[in-house]
């Protein structure tokens, strides 16, 4: 068995080959796109394992490398301290270090979802970015109206409100043109969201896990689909509590001997899911006495612990969601 470390880029990639004893057999830099790199790797004596660092397009590269390598490992870029904490760093050195980590079975691996799941996640993130863009445009419209001293007499984003906005008198021609273009942006973004959500609804209805999670009070289709898409295979987690670390909703920790300091949440993993799960948690607190009792128990009557309590409750719901996806059971409250 040979071990290959690959430091890949769009136009240039470097790979290093080690034998089973860790002896370096060679290193090569390939100038060109990924198909050329795959062709050069196919010339390496088989069988061999290969390791590379996750970045944009890692899923496609993973599938291409599986056609030539016996085993493919994708390394988590945030955990490659051996590579980044060094005084000398270049592509050949990085490739050799990846090969050594693969040989020593020390690769901090990441989960590689299927192409369909990657597309599903991409559409979820696209919707989130579209919503952020629409919010930015709405804020710009509000700022324009305030700068003109115009008071809005009704909800602005309803059909009636938008008709009023189109007809409101703005004396300055440049500001009126900016108003018109912002309205066009809002209408375009609304149409885009309708198309995106139509496809996401279709996908969510086809996946049984989404409907299962929607039995939890406060969890809608947007939260259900995001959690389901990013969990993907619920059996890949060794234990339920690991889900909190995956979504970055556990506190940072600095412990040594008797000292144990807990800080802000790590915020690792997809921010879209964290935002949605916290919103769903607030809804669950309002709608479910059981979820509210868990929140109040953590809060312990102290208003300063509200943020701690909402994060703890969100973490609890994520653990419940993972258990539900594993067992196929619907929501039922169990005191934690």
Image (cartoon, rainbow, N blue to C red):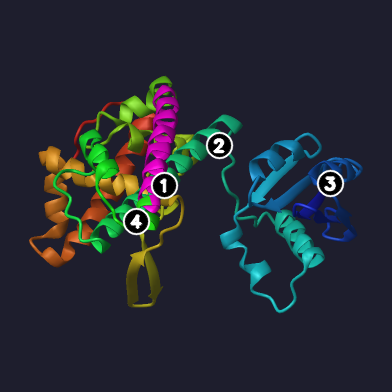
Q: Where is mark 2, residue-wise?
A: 118
Residue 122, horizontal then vertical, whole percent: 52, 39
Q: Residue at x 68, y 39 (%)?
A: 60
Looking at marks 3 and 1 on the same chain, the residue that comes earlier in the sequence is marked by 3
Q: Where is mark 4, residue-wise?
A: 140
Looking at marks 4 and 1 on the same chain, the residue that comes earlier in the sequence is marked by 4
Cα gap from disc 3 to disc 1, whole angstroms: 46 Å
Instruction: For the C terminus, give its image quadrant.
Output: top left
Q: Which residues are magenta?
A: 177-202
Mark 2, Cα crowd under 10 Å, few <14 / some 14-19 / many 20+, is: some
Q: Is residue 331 left or right of residue 224?
A: left
Cα gap from disc 4 to disc 1, whole angstroms: 11 Å
Give the label on residue 37, or none: 3
Residue 167, horizontal then vertical, whole percent: 26, 42
- How many labels sit on residues? 4
Q: Where is mark 1, residue-wise?
A: 181
Kindly indicate whether the residue at mark 4 contacts the one at mark 3 (C-beta within 8 angstroms): no
Q: Is residue 130 left or right of residue 10?
A: left
Kindly indicate whether the residue at mark 4 contacts the one at mark 2 (C-beta within 8 angstroms): no
């Amino acid at each position: 068995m040979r071990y290959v470390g690959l430091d890949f880029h769009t136009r240039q990639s470097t790979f290093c080959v080690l034998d089973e004893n860790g002896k370096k057999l060679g290193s090569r830099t390939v100038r060109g796109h990924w198909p050329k790199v795959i062709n050069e790797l196919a010339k390496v004596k088989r069988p061999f394992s290969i390791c590379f660092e996750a970045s944009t397009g890692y899923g496609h590269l993973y599938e291409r490398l599986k056609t030539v390598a016996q085993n493919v490992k994708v390394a988590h870029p945030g955990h490659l301290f051996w590579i980044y904490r060094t005084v000398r760093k270049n592509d050949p050195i990085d490739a050799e270090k990846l090969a050594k980590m693969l040989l020593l079975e020390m690769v901090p691996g990441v989960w590689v979802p299927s192409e369909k799941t990657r597309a599903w996640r991409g559409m979820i993130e696209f919707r989130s970015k579209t919503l952020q863009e629409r919010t930015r445009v709405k804020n710009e419209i509000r700022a324009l109206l305030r700068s003109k001293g115009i008071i809005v007499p009704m909800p602005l984003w309803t059909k009636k409100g938008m008709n009023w906005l189109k007809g409101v008198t703005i004396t300055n021609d440049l500001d009126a043109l900016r108003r018109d273009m912002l309205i066009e942006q809002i209408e375009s973004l609304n149409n885009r969201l309708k198309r995106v959500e139509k496809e996401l609804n279709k996908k969510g209805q086809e996946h049984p896990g989404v409907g299962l999670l929607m039995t939890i009070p406060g969890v809608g289709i947007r939260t259900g689909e995001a959690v389901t898409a990013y969990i993907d295979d619920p059996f890949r987690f060794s234990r339920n509590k690991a889900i909190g670390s995956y979504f970055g909703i556990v506190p940072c920790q600095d412990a040594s001997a008797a000292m144990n300091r807990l800080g802000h949440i790590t915020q690792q993993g997809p921010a879209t899911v964290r935002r949605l799960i916290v919103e769903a948690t607030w809804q669950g607190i309002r709608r479910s006495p059981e979820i509210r009792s868990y929140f109040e128990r953590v809060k312990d009557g102290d208003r300063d612990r509200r943020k701690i309590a909402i994060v703890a409750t969100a973490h609890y719901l994520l653990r419940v969601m993972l258990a539900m996806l594993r067992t196929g059971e619907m929501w039922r409250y169990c005191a934690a």
